[in-house]
Amino acid sequence: MKTSTTSTGSTGPTDSAASAAEGPTKTSATPSAAPRKSVLSRLLNTFLDPSTAVYPIMVALFVVLILLNPTLGEPDQFTRLIGRMAPIVIVTLGQYFVLVSGEFDLSQGAVIGVQVVVAGSFIGDDNSRIVPGLLLMLAIGVGVGAFNGLATAYLKIPGFMTTLGTMFMLGGMTRYLTGGAASGNPSEQFREVGRGGIDVPLLGYLPWSVLVLAGCLVVAAVLARRPVGRLLVARGDNPTAVSLAGANRGWLMARGFIASSLFATVAAIVLVGFAGTHPTVGQGYQYTAIAAAVVGGVVLGGGRGLVLSAAAGAFVLETLVAVLNASGIDTSWRATVQGLLIILALTLTAARTKLGPLLTLRRRSTS
Amino acid sequence: MVNLKGNVMSSTNLPMRRFVAPLLAVAVVLLGACAAPGGSDSGSDTDKGDASSLDQAAYDKEDADRTATFEGDPAQPYLQYLPGGEMVDPKPYARTTPGKVCFSNASLSNVWRQTGWITMYEQYKVLKDQGVISDLVMRDAQDDENTQVSDIDFLIKEGDCDAFIIAPATVEATASAIGRACETGKPVVVFDRGTTETCITSFVHSIGGYAWGIDSASFLADQLEEGDTVVALRTAPGVDVFEQRWAAATKIFKDAGLKVTDHITGADPAEIKSVMADELTSGEVDGVWVDLGDQAVPAIEAFQDAGMDIPAITGEDNMAYLRAWDELGFNGFAPVYSNFQWRTALLAVAMLFQGEEIPKDWTVPQTPITSDELPEVIKANAEMPDVHSARCGCEDMPSFPGPWVSRKTP
């Protein structure tokens, strides 16, 4: 990943936020020209680089949302809004580690479904079972992830199919355990993490879910820079090279999928607090997460993408839903419009992926 | 970030990946769009109702039926019916020996259907002890109309059935299979969603979706002033029962001059709470109307979480809503889609076996729960789980309350 040489040109240090985070680039720009053009070209590059282009889109959508509904711009209302978006962003963080390695995790929604049911039926009203309940949920998360990873690596089934199978298995299990209809919310104390928050100076109010989200973002960002994160990207780029380099394929994939289902588990803890126990909770989150990651510039098939950009992609999709809800578009059309806008966003991403290098190359040739 | 070196390195498998990745992307986006908020409700059928228009004749009839006097003992609402209709001559169906009943069920995928099935099964045990019914076979079509068609055909060929009960998954798609069941000459009782097939022996149902919508929307219209804002939470578009409830409510709200914003939530509590939280930031909400009881409690929680007073919120006869209403003391109202029609359908067959006449169009009452009746209902159902339907009409069953508390579906 040290080959960001395409950005050498007369425009100066055009490295994007992404490459800046990954060490110095071998640019040899003329220092005198740099100060004048750098801001503009940096901005331009942010737009052109598929892995960071999502940030301006995200900011623009938040601005549109706040224009449509100014109350959401108040600090304490904005933190609540972010808190409501937290679960899907957390799920996207998990999905990133699988996507970037060239696989898909379709079982995330089913993992959330199982965890929500476990929280409802195992913990129930008994506060003394919160800690054992949490441990049980984490164990389930690790177990599902390890199964997905090992089956994908050793049975040579594409992760798409493995996790599809896991999805049906977990769905069937949830159905069996609940008779098709989950019942009974966990105790209010357990739900606090999804429903409550604290009063803080400046912001006014900070939901716990925002803190959980912040923690998840830090963990994901660190994980992405650890060897395991690097190896997952490398596997997505060229699995043979990773194998030949001596990496343990099974253990690597297991860790990728475990990350995915553990993030889904954390999202489930927040979700069951926020929403309570219901069979629909978590349904379809894996698809939103995949779409979000792609909007955030993660390349399907793996090898490219930044974890925080994937998270920004999730914010984009969630804000889009909020904008559509606030826009007064007829209810029956909202899902359709949302689908079209997602496809539009993906088309733009695809176009940038193709156009980006062309434009930077052209600039280089004019130097 | 474009990684040229990576491209070169992976060029061996590039053609395949180029081909597969976009395909997967398209598949994922399509699936994602389907599963996006407002997607399908796991518990409902996909029957395409007449979404936009209101069937005025049906609306007027259901409106009148709400206040009609039903034939029979009000203590046994599951045996009551609207008088004046055609009765079925039981002679061809009367038996001297116990008969086997085959039940093709659309699904058990929501709590209302589960409660109904528990009640029907307990009623079967009673009728078996009485020597009226020898056996009850149920096939669950899991919300799939094609599965249901093959279920019905299987029951006709292999079931050795003396009577059929059919709860159709959709109105049109199962009609021809129901027609084949009629050709056996055995009684065919349809309940819940109707059928376009006219050969059936009897159709058991409660008054209907329009009446449900009229009841709940009229309550809000009475409580609110002209110009007040109502948020309507809808489960899924295009499902006939929900469309009828919504069409009736829209009409009432419009006549009362209320401002309505509606959202389709898929009955997902996370979606409901998000939508409500957004609504609460964008202005005053004076009332909430739901088209399914499951949606009410998350809506109530949204007001609690925002630290606001809970306005008038309608629900249904699910215990979760009734308990929240009782404990929090807001202005509530519970329209009812009578769960005891499951019991009625089996009793209809039993009555034919015993040579008793039944109504051809058997309309059972659907009586809403009002604040006057609430304390009594809460007390009577103290043991019942949150997902129980208070209007189960099951309290006089000898096995009550065991199976309804444990909710082990047979």
Image: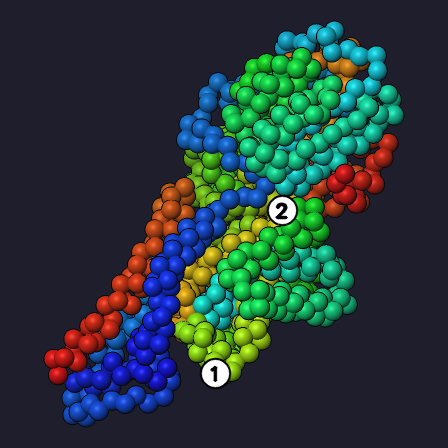
Q: How is the image coloured?
A: rainbow
Q: Amino acid at mark 1?
A: Ala
Q: Amino acid at mark 2?
A: Phe
Q: Nearer the viewer, residue A242 or B254?
A: A242
Which residue is pictured at 17% across the width and 80% down the height?
A364
Which residue is pictured at 67% across the width and 9% down the height?
B87
**Residue B222, image quadrant:** top right
Which residue is pictured at 47% across the width and 80% down the height?
A244
- Chain ID of residue with mark 2: B
Q: Where is residue B378 shown, x and y percent of the image?
A: 75, 41
The answer to whether residue B83 of the structure is visible from this angle is: no
Task: Give the residue at mark 1.
Answer: A245
Q: Are marks 1 and 2 in contact (CB under 8 Å)?
A: no
For label 1, count other residues whose C-alpha is less than 10 Å away and answer few (under 14), some (14-19) or many (20+).
Answer: few
**Residue A348, image quadrant:** bottom left
Number of labels in the image equals: 2
Q: Where is residue A155 shown, x and y percent of the image?
A: 57, 64
Q: Where is residue A199 shown, x and y percent of the image?
A: 55, 72
Task: Give the residue at mark 2.
Answer: B330
Q: Where is residue B400 shown, x and y percent of the image?
A: 83, 36
Residue A54 badge: none
Would residue A272 be found to the left or right of residue A66 on screen? right
Q: Nearer the viewer, residue B209 or B167?
A: B167
Which residue is pictured at 60% across the width and 52% down the height?
A168
Mark nearest the camera among 1 and 2 is 1
- Chain ID of residue with mark 1: A
Q: Are marks 1 and 2 on the same chain?
A: no
The answer to whether residue B86 of the structure is visible from this angle is: yes
Q: Nearer the viewer, residue A82 or A289?
A: A289
